[in-house]
Image (cartoon, rainbow, N blue to C red):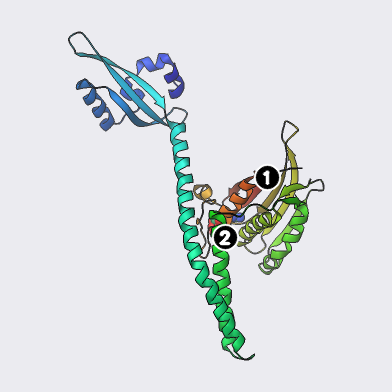
Amino acid sequence: PKAEEILNISQENAKKIRIDRLLQLDEKERIRIFHELKKKKNIDHFEVDYQRNDDKNLILELTAFIILDENKDVLGAVTLVNDLTEKKKMDDYLSRVEKFAALGRIVSGIAHEVRNPLASIYTTVQNLENELSENNAARDDLQNIMQEIDRVEKLIRQILNLAKPLPLQIETVDINELLRTTIPLIEKEAKKRGITLKTALSGDIEYTKADPNRLRQVILNLLINAIESTAKRGKITVSTEMVAESDGQTKWMLMKFKDNGIGITPDILDKIFDPFFTTKNVGTGLGLSVSHKIIQDHNGMIEVESQKNKGTTFSVKLPILG
Ligand SMILES: Nc1ncnc2c1ncn2[C@@H]1O[C@H](COP(=O)(O)OP(=O)(O)O)[C@@H](O)[C@H]1O
Ligand SMILES: [Mg+2]
């Protein structure tokens, strides 16, 4: 009966099909199993990929016990089927989390090692600049160097943030106000590229407890991505709204960042939150992973919906905490 459920097949139908067909064994698997059974051995934990008639892909584990008659000849075998699909998924997820943690430790080690010499290079360049006369042409070069060092330093800070974030600095936050003060920071860049930035902020957004600086970082990351993915005459809309769960108790505030840019193809949609995943020539691939981590730390959710060449919407849901 359990097998009927796993395989989505009725007992009636199952009886009509031979076991190797039933389990979609390929030639190699079939031969191996029959070989083992002939040698009067049981089959232990044999894994097969199985595509069910509703197109669901399963990973099944087979265990078979042979039945011998009194002459020790093989009469048949009892096969047990176990559905490993969920367990496998969990194992994959855990190994990803572990890999991520290990990567974090390595990266943060390197980042710390790079940071100190970088700081002393910066100070040296700054001293050099101070020693030069006002109209010395080398000043520009030195300033360029300092700008580049700033860029690297910022990148390192992001990486460290991801690997080992500082504790949240929780305050009462008015999300609409936070958006109103954050959007102007990138408005000029949007204008320069001929992109329209609109807001549709709901009047009844409740205050919540959050770390405003971290949230600002998320808002900027999402807006910068939207700008970078949108061509001239593009449109970006930032909106807020309150949503209540059906229990009427839990309330969330929802921020949406909608653009009509290049969109994201389905095959990379589940990778964009991975650290260092980027499709850009000069991207760091950190914006979304940092944002995801920050929202997770707030017990919120960040989700994406996208259509190639149509546009992308990122939704950030934060719990309302009194
Ligand atoms: N609004 C968007 N429209 C289209 N693609 C996006 C958008 N936001 C993110 N992406 C995709 O997700 C990837 C990862 O984004 P992110 O983590 O911010 O790194 P980066 O911007 O440095 O590439 C981008 O390279 C891009 O392919
Ligand atoms: Mg980005």
Up the image or down, 164 lies above or below 233; here it is above
**Looking at the image, do the residues carrying marks 1 and 2 touch, with CB atoms under 8 Å apart?**
no
Q: Which residue is mark 2?
A: 158
Dot 2, crowdedness within 10 Å: few (<14), some or many (≥20)?
some
Up the image or down, 11 lies above or below 125; here it is above
- Give the residue type that dot 1 points to: Lys
Viewer-proximal residue among 119 and 288: 119
- The quadrant holding residue 187 is bottom right
Task: For marks 1 and 2, give the CA distance.
Answer: 22 Å
Residue at the outermost right position: 203
Where disc 2 sits, the SS reads helix
User: Is 204 positioned to the left or the right of 148 in the image?
Assistant: right
Q: Which residue does the image show at 71% across and 53% down from the upper left?
A: 238
Q: Which residue does the image show at 28% across and 24% down from the upper left?
A: 43
- Give the residue type that dot 2 points to: Gln
Q: Is residue 263 visible?
A: no
Q: Position of residue 65 (x, y in %)?
A: 29, 18
Quarter of the figure with the N terminus: top left
Q: Which residue is mark 1?
A: 317
User: Is 219 positioned to the left or the right of 59 in the image?
Assistant: right
Q: Position of residue 22 (x, y in %)?
A: 36, 23
Q: Which residue does the image show at 74% across and 51% down from the upper left?
A: 171
Question: Which quadrant contains ligand 1?
Answer: bottom right
Quarter of the figure with the C terminus: top right
Viewer-proximal residue among 46 and 91: 91
Q: Which is more N-terminal, label 2 or label 1?
A: 2
- The quadrant holding residue 3 is top left
User: Is 180 positioned to the left or the right of 299 in the image?
Assistant: right
Q: Position of residue 11 (x, y in %)?
A: 42, 15
Q: How many marks?
A: 2
Q: Nearer the viewer, mark 1 or mark 2?
A: 2
Q: Position of residue 29 (x, y in %)?
A: 28, 30
